[in-house]
């Protein structure tokens, strides 16, 4: 006699970058076991597993490679909430040196959006650019390397288009060499206007408030980035 098949609960969330609603399920035991092996894994392997979990737990309706990095972080944390538990234990270090044990709820995570953020960048009076958000893999590559050339590579991968008053160049039609040559021809101030796109991009943030029992100081801190949330 065959064993009964269990119904897995289904939930809904809104993808931060698109506003589109998607359905998802919790990790299964076999998937959670894989996740537990990642304690000592490098960033590339962690990224691969996280993307695969996002893909299968959204019933393969979501392609992780087509989402912004903060979308992946947010979806993964919602999966973690429904699969393991919404409360996360953290330790906050007070200025006095005391370690404070506290916790936060994943359900309270915020998508921090800068009101001045834009993906359209004015280079000068006639030339502009439109940017795509970096993928999860793009961001992991930057975390793994201290090579400043990787920053230029990241910008190249995120260029959606370049245009002036008369022409439009699709980023997909331009070679890496052409894009690098364009970027290296910019002034420092012009490059900073592009960097501002990445600095002000939406972020998954958790604000933590904890009062030190030793000195009474109110400590205010914040977590952002999947590595900090990966607990």
Image (cartoon, rainbow, N blue to C red):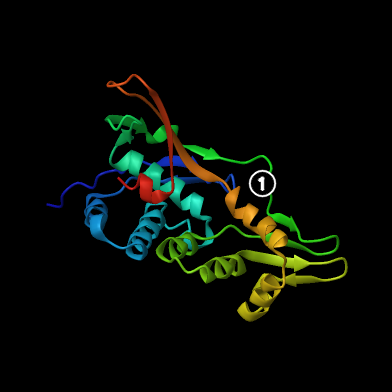
Name the residue carrying label 1.
Answer: 117
- Residue 74 appears at what percent x and percent y? 45, 45
- Residue 55 appears at what percent x and percent y? 41, 57
Q: Residue at x 55, y 60 (%)?
A: 134
Q: Residue at x 66, y 46 (%)?
A: 117
The secondary element bearing badge 1 is classed as: loop
Residue 19 vertical placement versus 86 (above, below): below
Residue 79 vertical placement versus 123 (above, below): above
Image-quadrant location for residue 8 = top left
Side (left or right) of 164 relative to 102: right
Mark 1 crowd level (few <14, some 14–19, many ≥20, 10 Å Cα): some
Q: Residue at x 27, y 50 (%)?
A: 28
Residue 14 showing in the rendered view: no
Side (left or right) of 90 relative to 180: left
> In front here: 160 or 59?
160
- Residue 21 appears at what percent x and percent y? 53, 44
């Amino acid at each position: 006699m065959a064993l009964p098949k269990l119904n897995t609960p289904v939930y809904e969330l809104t993808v931060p970058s698109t506003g589109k609603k998607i359905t998802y399920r919790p990790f299964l035991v076999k998937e959670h076991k894989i996740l537990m092996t990642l304690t000592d894994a490098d960033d590339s392997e962690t990224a691969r597993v996280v993307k695969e979990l996002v893909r299968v737990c959204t019933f393969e309706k979501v392609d992780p490679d087509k989402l912004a990095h903060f979308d992946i972080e947010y979806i993964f944390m919602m999966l973690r909430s429904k699969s393991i538990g919404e409360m996360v234990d953290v330790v906050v270090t007070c200025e006095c040196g005391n370690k404070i044990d506290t916790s936060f709820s994943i359900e309270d995570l915020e998508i921090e959006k800068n009101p001045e953020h834009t993906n359209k960048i004015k280079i000068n009076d006639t030339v502009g650019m439109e940017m795509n958000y970096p993928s999860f893999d793009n961001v992991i590559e930057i975390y793994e390397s201290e090579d400043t050339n990787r920053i230029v590579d990241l910008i190249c991968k995120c260029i959606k288009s370049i245009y002036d008053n008369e022409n439009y160049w699709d980023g997909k039609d331009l070679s890496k060499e052409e894009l690098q040559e364009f970027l290296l021809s910019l002034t420092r101030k012009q490059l900073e206007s592009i960097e501002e796109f990445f600095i002000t991009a939406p972020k998954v943030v958790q604000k933590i408030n904890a009062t030190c029992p030793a000195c009474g100081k109110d400590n205010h801190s914040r977590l952002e980035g999947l590595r900090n949330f990966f607990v």
